[in-house]
Amino acid sequence: MLNFLARRIAQLVPTLFFVSILIFSLQHLLPGDPALVMAGEEQDPAVIEQIRHQYRLDQPIPVQYVYWVKGVLSGDLGESLRIKVPVLDLIRQKLPVTLQLGSMAIVIAFLIGIPAGIISAVKRNTAWDYGANFFALWGISTPNFWLGIMLIFLFSIKLGWLPASGFVPLSENWRESLASTIMPAFVLGNAIAAILMRHTRSAMLQVLESDYVRTARAKGLSERSVILKHAMRNALTPVITLGALELGTLLSGAVLTEQIFSVPGFGKLIVDAVFNRDYAVVQGVVLVTATIYITLNLIADIAYILVNPRLRT
Amino acid sequence: MTDAVLGALPTHASDELESPARRALRRLFKRKGAVIGLVVLAVFILLALLAPLVAPYDPIATSWTLVRKPPSAAHWFGTDELGRDMLSRVIYGARASLLAGAISVTIALTIGVPLGLISGYRGGFFDALISRITDAMLACPFLILAIALAAFLGPSLADAMIAIGISATPVFIRLTRGQVMSVKVEDYVEAARAMGNPRWRIALFHILPNILPALLVQATLSIAAAIIAEAALSFLGLGQQPPFPSWGSMLNAAQRFLSNAPWMAIWPGLAIFLVVLSLNLVGDGLRDALDPRER
């Protein structure tokens, strides 16, 4: 186990190194001189020269990279070009919003996806199974920004039940907070529910054919107890770890969902940054996202080993 | 008894003689979902190709007298905020979406498959290097990477396709590499090596054809993902630029007029949904049809 952990963590170092190179080189994709882009309307050569010096753009690229990594490692992700605020502060401000939305989405995904998967496996080839499979296909195929727009049309414009946009933090007023986040959380959770349903279904189908389920049935246990106590417990372990890996889907989805519902979170931060040509913010957001994703992958791997005794040698 | 045996023989023999591609096609056509998917896709492809012939109006012709008119006999899908015919725009929009899906996945295949082949077949330092770069790219969620790339490349349909193609590449590198690793230890590869075939020949003629099924399934599902990504980038203004229609940018415009012109949001979204659903149905069907365990 310790060996595995050491190897797994050692693998992270080169991955993070390449992530940093990838994100650093984004800036060099910009057509033209970055200093000119940063200067914007300002065309004074002295100002441009000063920017070039300030951001070390006059130094060779490897030197620029070393300075950039040094900064990142000491928590300095640069400064937003537009509002002159450290990128890290912006991320600290916006991340909790997306985390609240994301947690709600995960809860919704598990509440829909797992029961649907279990029912469709247990009632294989019945109307229930077809219905659940159709739901999964629907969830995977619906673009979340369209679903968001349609929900706003139905629940905000036609029925007037929920606010169409905005965000109220949970700490301020939990009722309003739930009302403002339930639609975006459903939009985000819906796609993940579909993926979880498929994983659960195939895991359950496999487990239901195993010897210990046959034994449990043979000893005369009720079908309910066989499914809930014997089959489900074993089928859900891989599903839960796989679920953790859907975080990438969640973060990608948050970008458009937050845009549509005007939720001031992490996703909206990157879109606003893209439009304001605030490249330091774009780089910072991608870096933090990648780090979160890599860490969760690691946790999922460890969890998988912890719950699977056969891999624990 | 003899009759039964004789009767059973020909079908068995024809099953043995059937080429793998033909068998896969026959099994694919047995799946209702996949057939429906193929038909819907064919309709959209035809609409995209024949857009100038099928579209009732010019998709970029504006008219101040026709602003945001609900669906009618003259304009089946209604008109948009500049009085343009929605049906014509949805038909022309199929071009941007299908083109983006096809081109970006072609980019991903062209870069990903050779790198995966070399990486999986040769191993060693090159494999370690490529694998770590793949890990790094996969660590950035697909759409976020595509948005970041598109932001730095610039807003246009061509740049969006490049951004989506690059973001979709690591999946193909990883898939090809994994498939190559499992195929290269097979007896027929050993035999080809024993006969003195050069490495490139073994990789191209003995390994590649055997990993095609997995690549085909992934490519179908990736086209679906690429179409959603293109719509998302266009929705954000990073894809197809106005006045040319794209389903994503049409949805963006629709959001502003949701309370008095909801039809503007329904049709482009439904079009994306139908195309992506069909691709997913075909992808699922292909996966089952190509799975040797279900033979």
Image (cartoon, helix red, strand yellow):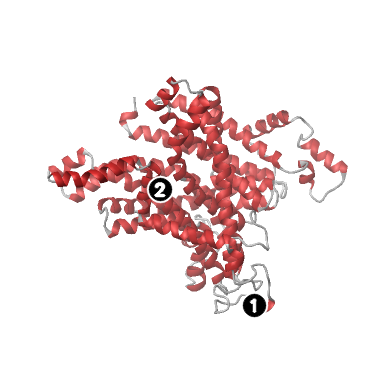
Quadrant assignment, res A206 = top left
Residue at 67%, 67% (x, y): give it: B60
Identify the chain of the residue marked 2, using the numbered disc in the image: B
Q: Which residue, given by chain and number where applicable, does mark 1 sit on?
A: B66
* Label 2: element kind: helix
Q: Quadrant of the N terminus of chain A?
A: top left
Residue at 46%, 44% (x, y): give it: B216
Q: Are marks 2 and 1 in contact (CB under 8 Å)?
A: no
Residue at 79%, 46% (x, y): give it: A39
Question: What amino acid is at disc 1?
Answer: Leu
Q: Is residue A274 above or below residue B109?
A: below
Whether residue B262 is visible: no
Residue B119: horizontal and vertical position, in percent?
52, 29
Residue at 53%, 67% (x, y): give it: B267
Q: From the viewer's side, name the closer residue of A182 and B127.
A: B127
Looking at the picture, do discs 2 and 1 lie on one chain?
yes
Whether residue B246 is visible: yes
* Label 1: element kind: helix
Circle number at residue B118: none
Q: Residues within 10 Å of mark 2 (few under 14, many from 20)?
A: many
Identify the chain of the residue marked 1, using the numbered disc in the image: B
Residue A187: horizontal and vertical position, in percent?
47, 57
Q: From the viewer's side, name the closer residue of A218 and A41.
A: A218
Q: Which residue, given by chain and number where applicable, does mark 2 sit on?
A: B286
Q: Nearer the viewer, mark 2 or mark 1?
A: 2
Q: What is the total number of numbered labels drawn onto the structure image?
A: 2
Residue A69: horizontal and vertical position, in percent?
65, 32
